[in-house]
Image (cartoon, coloured by chain):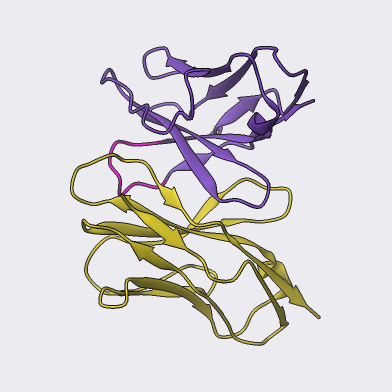
Chain colours: A yellow, B purple
Amino acid sequence: AQSVTQLDSQVPVFEEAPVELRCNYSSSVSVYLFWYVQYPNQGLQLLLKYLSGSTLVESINGFEAEFNKSQTSFHLRKPSVHISDTAEYFCAVSDAQGGSEKLVFGKGTKLTVNP
Amino acid sequence: GAGVSQSPSNKVTEKGKDVELRCDPISGHTALYWYRQRLGQGLEFLIYFQGNSAPDKSGLPSDRFSAERTGESVSTLTIQRTQQEDSAVYLCASSLYGPYNEQFFGPGTRLTVL
């Protein structure tokens, strides 16, 4: 069985500060890794994903995440956040070995960017 | 194009009543998923449909929960004899086939059981 742990339920930061949202996973098989974001009053949408190859993946709005197999982590980072980054962020994994296609989600981290 | 739609957006019901939630996936998406999000919790997988294959029902919490999908179109999630612990936001997602593909989520149905 797979599980995802997001250690921080809430992260408040000031605008233009760096931020890291932590995600650790547990799985007996290889996985695909995802970060989904839910902006206020909007549905969940994909932010970025790791499938294979380079362990560093980036989104179009400046977020990046690095897959660390030895630490089973996929932390999300941004060097300078904006007010518009205020949202709830969910880390998720899926089975890369042909098992179920379901996503297993963490409990989410609410990022609040203050002026 | 149109995204995933769900109806109703809100549903308030009395304990013991049956409810039916509807999901219209993106056209051409063969995979359809139902998830549940309880207050303060992550998304919990309920059921997965892929084309004409047998659905993966491994996440359904009890036999009061069931779901159907007609071909590669509309899906309905039915909860019988609702309980207060069924109160949650029920999310539907659709995707192209493959666990590496992005899942596109609907806006959800907020179910409140009194």
Q: Position of residue A83 (x, y in %)?
A: 73, 73
> Furthest-left residue in view?
A97
A91 or B82, nearer to the observer: B82
The residue positioned 47% from the left and 68% from the top of the image is: A59
Residue B25 horizontal side relative to residue A114, left or right? left
Q: In the rendered image of this protein, does residue A1 appear above or below residue A115?
A: above
| Quarter occupied by residue A39 | bottom right
Where does the image place residue B43, in percent across and percent down from the top left? 53, 46
Confirm whether the magenta stretch covers residue A55. Answer: no
Q: Which residues are magenta?
A: B95-102
Residue B96 covered by magenta stretch:
yes
Label count reads: 0
Q: Residue A43 in the image: x percent, y percent?
A: 62, 45
Q: Is residue A26 above or below residue A1?
A: below
- Which image quadrant is residue B5 in? top right
Q: Is residue B83 visible?
A: yes
Horizontal side of residue A44 vs B113, given as left or right: left
- The residue at the point 49 percent across, 67 percent down is A60
Magenta span: chief secondary structure: loop
What residue is at 65 percent from the left and 12 percent from the top?
A: B18
Image position, residue A33 (x, y; %): 36, 60
Q: Is residue B110 visible?
A: no
Task: From the viewer's side, name the closer residue of B49 and A115.
Answer: B49
Q: Nearer the viewer, residue B72 or B14?
A: B14
